[in-house]
Image (cartoon, rainbow, N blue to C red):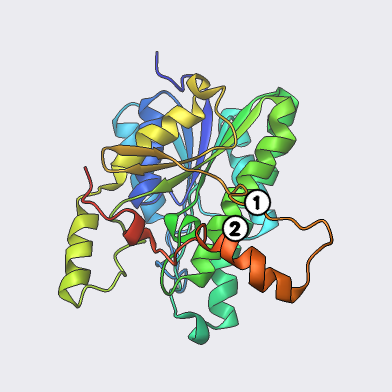
């Protein structure tokens, strides 16, 4: 018996990289899989192709699993509904949604165009909402379901040149928590993974200086399939008590992330003025200020 026997999973962006590995792992665990991928470039620009999704489907079937492909975009409401409907048409139900689809339009903030901002927000954040919302009605009716969303340390911690991606990924963490709060009464769970892997999504990282080249070499050690076991677990009944959490998978390491909570307080019975804040509150708070860390500063050791 596999951990996902009898379940039907949608994995968006499953034509390659992390999405493909999650789809393959879920199929091996017994799930029937909807392989969603529009087959576009990393930036989402240009012609699309059904080939990446078909390749994932073929691998699943070669291993004895069941899968269908879907090439609808996650970034529009009507097409997101078609993704969920494809699971119902092919397999009669939907139990798991993995929101993995993504694009990159990296740009330093003062040069980022509105088009670059909107393109990334539409796929990552709006796409996660649209597909989740389309599945929510069915999860509610059957009193069960699991969402697994892909966040990123670019949003949870920070990174250069990724204001659009970072904002979307931190927004996904908040979306996941809201889904968990609103739908727990219906037996529905929602959790996040911040994946680490060398894939098409990270291949655009600059590798010109010795430091950059060293970072890329570290990333290449973290292959996409290392993220799949965590996704399978979170989608399974073994994780029935896990809800509203944020995890990370980094090669052979697993992490549970904190979530923002107050770390220091100050009060004055007579209230505050801007001058009093500068004189009293600022010195009290300064020791707890968060540094301007990037993901690489926090995860500074080699992958284990």
Between the residue at mark 1 and the residue at mark 2, the CA separation in whole angstroms equals 6 Å
Identify which residue is drawn at 39% across, 24% down: 29
Q: Tell me the quadrant of the picture where the N terminus can be found.
A: top left
The residue identified by callout 1 is: 129
The local secondary structure at tag 1 comes to: helix
Residue situated in front as seen by the camera: 127 or 78: 127
In x, y percent, where is residue 222? 25, 49
Q: Answer left or right for 170 relative to 27.
A: right
Q: Answer left or right for 130 relative to 117.
A: right
In x, y percent, where is residue 274? 74, 75
**160 vs 124: above or below:** below
Identify which residue is drawn at 58% across, 60% down: 285
> Would residue 93 be seen by someone viewing this image from the given angle?
no
Identify which residue is drawn at 20% across, 56% down: 218
In x, y percent, where is residue 257? 47, 43
Residue situated in front as seen by the camera: 157 or 101: 157
**270 vs 160: above or below:** above
Q: Are marks 1 and 2 in contact (CB under 8 Å)?
A: yes
Residue situated in front as seen by the camera: 146 or 75: 146
Identify which residue is drawn at 55% across, 56% down: 170
The residue identified by callout 2 is: 125
Q: Which mark is residue 231?
A: none
In x, y percent, where is residue 16? 35, 52
Q: To which quarter of the image does residue 43 belong?
A: bottom left
Q: To which quarter of the image does residue 62 belong?
A: top left
Residue most extreme to the right:
270
């Amino acid at each position: 018996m596999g951990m996902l026997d009898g379940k039907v999973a949608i994995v968006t962006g499953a034509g390659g990289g992390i999405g493909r590995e999650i789809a393959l792992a879920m199929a091996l665990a017994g799930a029937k899989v909807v392989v969603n991928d529009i087959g576009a470039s990393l930036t989402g620009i240009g012609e699309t192709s059904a080939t990446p999704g078909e390749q994932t489907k073929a691998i699943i079937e070669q291993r004895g699993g069941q899968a269908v492909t879907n090439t609808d975009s996650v970034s529009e409401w009507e097409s997101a509904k078609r993704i969920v409907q494809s699971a119902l048409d092919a397999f009669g139900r939907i139990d798991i949604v993995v929101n993995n689809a993504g694009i990159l339009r990296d740009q330093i903030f003062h040069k980022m165009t509105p088009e670059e901002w909107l393109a990334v927000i539409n796929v990552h954040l709006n796409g996660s909402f649209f597909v989740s919302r389309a599945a929510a009605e069915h999860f509610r009716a059957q009193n069960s379901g699991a969402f697994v969303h892909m966040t990123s340390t670019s949003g949870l911690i920070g990174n250069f040149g990724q204001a659009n991606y970072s904002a979307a990924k931190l927004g996904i963490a908040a979306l996941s928590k809201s889904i968990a709060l609103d739908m727990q009464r219906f037996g529905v769970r929602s959790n996040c993974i911040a994946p680490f892997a060398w894939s098409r999504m990270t291949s655009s990282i600059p590798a010109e200086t010795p430091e950059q080249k060293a970072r890329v070499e570290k990333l290449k050690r973290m292959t996409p399939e290392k993220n799949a076991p965590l996704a399978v677990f979170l989608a399974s009944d073994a994780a029935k008590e896990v809800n509203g959490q944020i995890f990370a998978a980094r090669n052979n390491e697993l992490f549970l992330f904190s979530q923002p909570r107050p770390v220091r307080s100050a009060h004055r019975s007579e209230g505050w003025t801007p001058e009093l804040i500068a004189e009293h509150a600022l010195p009290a708070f300064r020791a707890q200020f968060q540094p301007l860390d990037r993901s690489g500063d926090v995860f500074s050791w080699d992958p284990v």
